[in-house]
Image (cartoon, rainbow, N blue to C red):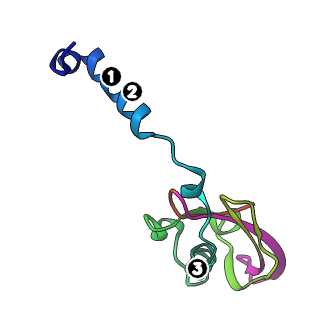
Amino acid sequence: MSMSLITSSPRGLLIAAVMCCAIVGCQPSASNLSVNEPLAREACERFLTAWKEGKQLKDLKPNIIGGDFEWSNGLKLVGFELLPKVHNDGANLHIPVRLTVQNAKGRESKSEVMYTVSTSPSVTVFRE
């Protein structure tokens, strides 16, 4: 069967695409999804700095996709400290952070929280 017969129909195009994927490999390898620790730390710091500067989560896109419920709920970040005992699970870096947040009435509270940061296929920072 000639290639022109295969690719001349929608079904033939699908078959050709599947064959290409089987030959080349469409699945990302585990090494492609490994977390880049220096980039993950930098992304977490940039994420928290943006919060502290009064920016919104959407201001980080498309470079960083992330979320934090206190940020989304309008609390102000007064200070933060990335703590040293990180955990690398291969695909993500789990970074402990000491936060000082301020509510609408000006009351400050401190807590230690964990952020999960991924660097592949995109940079993401989410609070656990």
Up the image or down, 46 lies above or below 32; here it is below
Is 89 situated left or right of 6 in this image?
Answer: right
Q: Label 3: few (<14), some or many (≥20) within 10 Å?
A: few
Whole-number angstrom distance, CA of label 2 to CA of label 1: 6 Å
Is 114 situated left or right of 32 in this image?
Answer: right
Within the image, what quadrant is residue 68 found in? bottom right
Whole-number angstrom distance, CA of label 3 to CA of label 2: 38 Å
Q: Is residue 117 magenta?
A: yes
SS for callout 1? helix
Tell me the number on the disc at residue 83: none
Amino acid beneath label 3: Glu
Whole-number angstrom distance, CA of label 1 to CA of label 3: 41 Å
Q: Residue at x 62, y 80 (%)?
A: 45
Tell me the number on the disc at residue 14: 1
Q: Where in the figure is residue 33, as x and y percent of width and height? A: 58, 56
Amino acid beneath label 2: Val
Magenta-drawn stretch, dominant element (helix, strand or loop): strand
Q: Where in the figure is residue 81, as x and y percent of width and height? A: 74, 85
Q: Closer to the camera, 49 or 14?
A: 14
Span of residues in magenta = 97-120
Residue at mark 3: 42
Within the image, what quadrant is residue 80 found in? bottom right
SS for callout 2? helix
Q: Residue at x 65, y 58 (%)?
A: 91
Residue at mark 2: 18
Q: Is residue 7 magenta?
A: no
Mark 1 or mark 3: whose residue is earlier in sequence: 1
Mark 3 or mark 2: whose residue is earlier in sequence: 2
Amino acid beneath label 1: Leu
